[in-house]
Image (tube, rainbow, N blue to C red):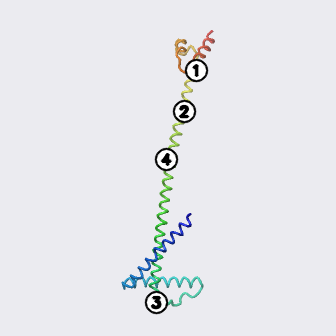
Amino acid sequence: MVLPLLKLGTLALRTICKPIANQLKKEAGVNPKFRQFIINIAQANHRFTTKLQRRASGRITDAVIRPLNEERAVQAAADLLGELFAFTVAGAALVYEVQRNARGEAKKEEKRQQELAEFRRKHEKMENEIEEMKQRCCLLHEELSKPINEQPSKPLNEEVSKPRGLAWLYSYMCYQNAAEKIK
């Protein structure tokens, strides 16, 4: 999927660059200062590429490099500026895409951090609830382990007669056990 889009984008850039190069050639024919400017660019590029090619092939690099004629220089400069425009647009598109991906990653990371903070908050809340339940169990255990005569005196019948869901069954059984111990 990415490769066809890349090829399509490259083709579109080349298509856009051709009219730009043609416009540069027209401007070079009309404006003498601009013509001299792009000829100088083309000559500098010609010298650089020729020296680079000679070094790569192992030939002498100190030899004199003949300059291009004006028409070839204008053509080379127009091509060079067209390619420069294409690479600039492609580079800008690449920078935009990288920044867009970075923003997306930053949003994902922020969401992960929020989820982690929420998880930690819930975990801490559960730990507090567990600790509170442990304390309540200890208090209940202490109350239940006290001898019967130390417990507050309430009429046992009154306690049993108050229905509280299934808790009355537990209270009734405790009443029966307490009554058996007293006898």
The front one of 21 and 54 is 21
Res. 114 mark = 4
Residue 181 place in picture, x, y as percent:
63, 12
User: Which amino acid type corresponds to the residue marked 1 in the rendered image?
Assistant: Leu
What residue is disc 3 on?
69
Q: Which quadrant is the C terminus positioned in?
A: top right
What residue is disc 1 on?
144
Q: Is residue 69 above or below residue 148?
A: below
Q: Is residue 102 above or below residue 78?
A: above
- Give the farthest residue toward the top: 183
Instruction: Tell me which label, 2 or 1, sits earlier in the chain.
Output: 2
Instruction: Tell me which label, 1 or 3, sits earlier in the chain.
Output: 3
User: Which amino acid type corresponds to the residue marked 4 in the rendered image?
Assistant: Gln
Disc 1 secondary structure class: helix
Residue 136 place in picture, x, y as percent:
54, 27
Q: CA distance from mark 4 to mark 1?
A: 45 Å
What residue is disc 2 on?
131
Instruction: Tell me which label, 4 or 3, sits earlier in the chain.
Output: 3
Residue 23 figure quarter: bottom left
User: Which amino acid type corresponds to the residue marked 3 in the rendered image?
Assistant: Asn
Q: CA distance from mark 2 to mark 4?
A: 26 Å
Disc 3 secondary structure class: loop
Q: Are marks 4 and 1 in contact (CB under 8 Å)?
A: no
